[in-house]
Image (cartoon, rainbow, N blue to C red):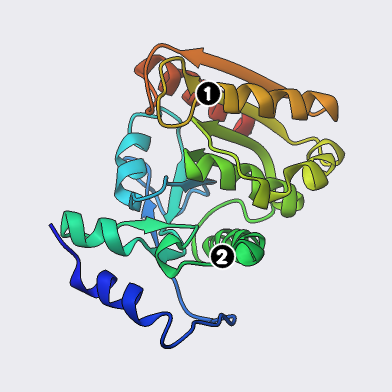
Amino acid sequence: MSFPLLAQNGKSKEEFPFEFAPQKRLGRYRILYPPKYNPKVKCSLVLLLHGNSQEPSVLLRWAKQLTVPNVIYVCPEGTYTHLGETLKRGAYRFTAAGEDLLFPESLKSTVVDYSAEWYNNVIMDAKRKLNVHKFDPCTVVGFSQGGFYASVLASRYPENFSNVVSICGSMFQEGKMEDNVPNLKRYGIEILLLHGAQDTVVPIQTSQLYKSLLEKYGVSVQMYSFEGGHWPSQEATNRISDWITAHIQR
């Protein structure tokens, strides 16, 4: 399948060069309420961050397997539409990296900053609108690209998070994690890393290296390797369920 629009943009960029400027706009997030939800009972809030070229329902359907009572899950769309994948699949797909906009290397750290700000805004908005414990720090669970952003988010806005779950998480130098990892230690944020031993999309060594970085700064971290590829196994899902339950017990 060809994408004439993408081809046209590629041909015209030299004739009409691109420049980039901040853009303020509204974004969307989706909500998973607990079974037999009682709006009079306050819930804990968990933020889910999907992977590159996914959309929120992928993680929200998976989250239905998490047997944690009285939790509301919110999952924002990635900051940018992944145009190529959207055209290919005939359905919206999102990314937090904006690959289709061809950002230069010099702006990639800024892209990370703005995407992290958007995800944090979702937490603030959800706390205002939903019947949740508004002053409790949250759990953030991210898959693949979302695993990277889960760590970025907690290290940039540590006052809003108590723990991080990263599933097959990627890692990019634009996140400047080493600059901000001390914030995780300072706020006592705990990290759970899970990675498929046979992951060919993001090699397990990525999480192993990140674990070493966290240990270097004294951050509380656990790592679990599961049999499988680039998606959490049932055993990994059960472990995540236990982890979230332990961190939101009231």
Q: Position of residue 130 (x, y in %)?
A: 49, 60
Q: Can residue 185 be seen in this view?
A: yes
Looking at the rendered structure, the kind of residue marked 2 is Trp
Q: Mark 1 points at which residue?
A: 194
Viewer-closest of 224 and 29: 224
Where does the C terminus fall, quadrant-wise? top right
Residue that label 2 marks: 118
Task: Compare residues 49 and 246 and report the one nearer the observer.
Answer: 49
| Point 43% across, 88% down: residue | 16
Q: Position of residue 226 (x, y in %)?
A: 45, 13
Element type at mark 1: strand
- For disc 2, the neighbor class at 10 Å (few under 14, some 14 to 19, many from 20) is many
Q: Which of 144 and 130 is in front in this view?
A: 144
Q: Which residue lies furthest to the top in this view?
A: 227
Q: Is residue 112 left or right of residue 14?
A: right
Identify the residue at image location x=58%, y=22%: 205
Q: In this view, does 156 lie above or below 2?
A: above
The reply to whether the C-beta atoms of the residues labelled 2 and 1 are less than 8 Å apart is no
Quadrant including the N terminus: bottom left
Classify mark 1: residues with Cα within 10 Å, few (<14), some (14-19) or many (20+): many
Q: Which residue is drawn at 49% across and 82% down?
A: 18
On screen, residue 73 versus residue 111, left or right, reads: left
Q: How far apart are marks 2 and 1 (CA)?
A: 25 Å
**Residue type, mark 1 in image:** Leu
The answer to whether 171 is drawn above or below residue 52 in the figure is above
Point 76% across, 29% down: residue = 214
Q: Closer to the N terminus: mark 2 or mark 1?
A: 2
Q: Could you tell me which secondary element the residue under label 2 belongs to?
A: helix
Q: Position of residue 77 (x, y in %)?
A: 40, 59
